[in-house]
Image (cartoon, helix red, strand yellow):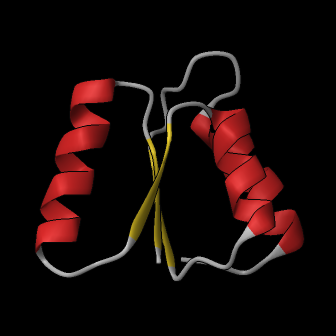
Amino acid sequence: MILIVEDDNDINNLIYQTLTKSGYECKQAFSGTEGIMLFDMQDFALVILDLMLPGMSGEDVLNKMKQNKNIP
């Protein structure tokens, strides 16, 4: 499963639609805190992470994710 963390609805939906049409299972998050919550609740093979998120930067989200799990 792939986690998409992107605050822009149009971009997030475009990535989601493209990946699901290619046969991938995806979850969408629209903020850093939502992304961390989903990441902690489920195992993901890959995270697509926007670096310019409002509130919590993508770098901060990545650091929090790496504290708990090793993920590309």
Count of marks overlaid on the render: 0
23 on left or right of 1 = left
In this picture, is 47 found above or below 33? below
> Residue 5: horizontal and vertical position, in percent?
49, 45
Answer above or below: position of 51 versus 65: above
Q: Where is residue 36 in the image (x, y as percent from the top left)?
A: 73, 49
The location of residue 6, given as percent across then percent down, is 43, 37
Seen as rendered, the residue at the extreme top is 55
Q: Which of 61 and 31 is in front in this view?
A: 31
Q: Residue furthest right?
A: 67
State the residue at coordinates (12%, 77%).
22
Please tell me which residue is depicted at 70% across the width and 44% down the height of the picture. 61
Seen in the image, is 32 located left or right of residue 26? Answer: right
Q: Residue 24 at x, y = what percent?
A: 28, 78
Q: Which residue corresponds to the image point at 59% horizontal and 31% vertical from the top-left?
A: 31
Residue at the (34%, 24%) spot, across then down: 8
- The answer to whether 26 is drawn above or below residue 11 in the figure is below
Q: Where, by quadrant of the figure, is residue 2 drawn?
A: bottom left
In this image, 7 relative to 18: left or right?
right
Using the image, determine if residue 3 lies above or below residue 56: below
- Residue 32 position by quadrant: top right
